[in-house]
Amino acid sequence: MTLEKVRNIVFWIIDFIRGGSIKRHYIDIKALSENEDGEDTIAMQHQYLSELLTHASSTTNFYKEINPTDLTNFPVIDKEIIKSRYSDFQSETYTTKKSVSVSTSGSTGSAFTIHQDFNKKYRNTADIIYFSELAGFKLGFKLFYLRFWTMFKQKNKLQSFLQNVVPVSVFDLTFKNIEKLIAALKNDQSNKGMIGYASSFDKIGKYLDSIGSEPIHCNLKSVVGISERLDLSTKLSIKKYFNVDMISRYSNAENGMIAQQPTGKEYFKINWASYYVEILNLNTNQRVQPGELGRIVITDLFNYYTPFIRYDTGDIGIMDYHTRTESTKQQLVLTKVEGRKMDMIRNTSGELLSTSILLIINKYREIEQRQIIQKTKKEYVFKLKVKNNSFRKEQVFIKEFEKYLGKDAIIKIEYVTEIPLLTSGKQRVIIDEAYC
């Protein structure tokens, strides 16, 4: 029996001894996700939502005056509202019970810590197991995790054994250390996966391009990009060198696994089993029509300690119908997850532009790193790291972006030796200082 199989078995044995909560949630998530439009599934999702709304209105000060019969009776909230009245969001039936605290990094705003009950923790663990399987990763495989590790608590020995995680610091992801990472992947022939910030995999691809690497055979089964926009060019690079279809996962620290791309697809399958997702108008709290851009607002169906109802994630996206290949039935998916509103860019007329505008930069081979800062409604600063400190196409570059930003756009170029990472280890490619 392989060691990865042992880890899998031990994990489920420990869960069984503790009451089997994760297994029950896993079975439920799998059943609901694989039969999204079934009558039983729709009835169960309605029950989860109804029970949450009733619980929130009867046990928290913030929601106590609200009629729980309709979700739209509840106000849209955001991080700042929760922080300003945090105790009012906590359920009086849970504040005396043990809880789990989770924190955001504060990379796109101030840090944020909330409490979850243990049932929510088990649900989130089951979400991750199920959606990881869809991406090709099975419990027990070795996981190379690219993140800023000094921000996170160290695992105990049992957790380290079961999770089989190899930490890789994104702050040290120089070409020299990428070389060591590739060597580690080659030397370990066990089944494995990789997960981390999308920009980290972009760096890996660029390193392999720079050395003219051949395809790497290392039993890599899954590659998942998180926290940042995943460009198609990065996906193609990972496919070229590792023969793995990289996918993007949409999640956050305060809630969990919201949506994930199916293998080989660009849309995101929504985790309807654990969340109710709405897309609201950018300036009002009205729901938009399918296919229209808006704010991603979620209701977390399982955090009873701190109910998150109609929570504005700060992200922008489009929800639309997608026809399944195996049937003629349609399902609602996220066709775009554009990133945070504060990380969107507008033209000089104030219209939001898709972050796919970044793809234009990719055709300029001299540019190794880039960051766009919108300083005012008409002034833009492009910070560029270029090869050999030389960029002869600067004026062509400016003229091309004037087509998208506006003829009256004031575009300045700043050459830098490095685009610094945020304290979270993420790379912020677009910064909006004009509208935020």
Image (spheres, grey):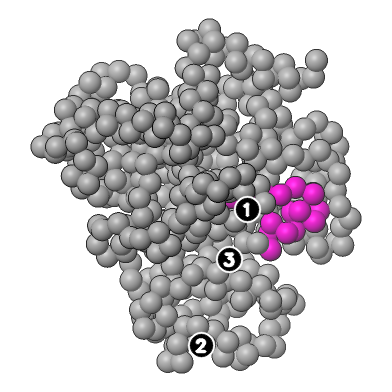
Residue range in magenta is 233-248
Q: Name the residue at 14% across, 37% down.
A: 67
Q: Which residue is mark 2?
A: 402
Q: Name the residue at 62% across, 44% down.
A: 326
Q: Is residue 118 above or below residue 234?
A: above
Q: Quadrant of residue 57?
A: top left
- Magenta span has 107? no
**Mark 2 neighbour density, 10 Å: few (under 14) some (14–19) many (20 or more):** some
Kind of residue at badge 2: Glu
Q: Which residue is mark 3?
A: 419
- Residue 184 appears anywhere in the view: no
Which of the two residues, 156 or 272, is positioned nearer the viewer here? 272
First of labels 1, 3 by sequence position: 1
- Majority secondary structure in the magenta region: helix
Q: Is residue 85 above or below residue 284?
A: above
Q: Is residue 135 above or below residue 431?
A: above
Q: From the viewer's perspective, is the residue at label 1 or at label 3 nearer?
A: 1
Residue 321 percent across, percent down from the top left: 47, 54
- Residue 179 appears anywhere in the view: yes
Residue 300 percent across, percent down from the top left: 36, 37
Q: Which residue is mark 1?
A: 265
Q: Secondary structure at mark 1?
A: loop
Which of the two residues, 278 or 357, is positioned nearer the viewer here? 278
**Mark 1 neighbour density, 10 Å: few (under 14) some (14–19) many (20 or more):** some
- Quadrant where the image shows the N terminus: top right
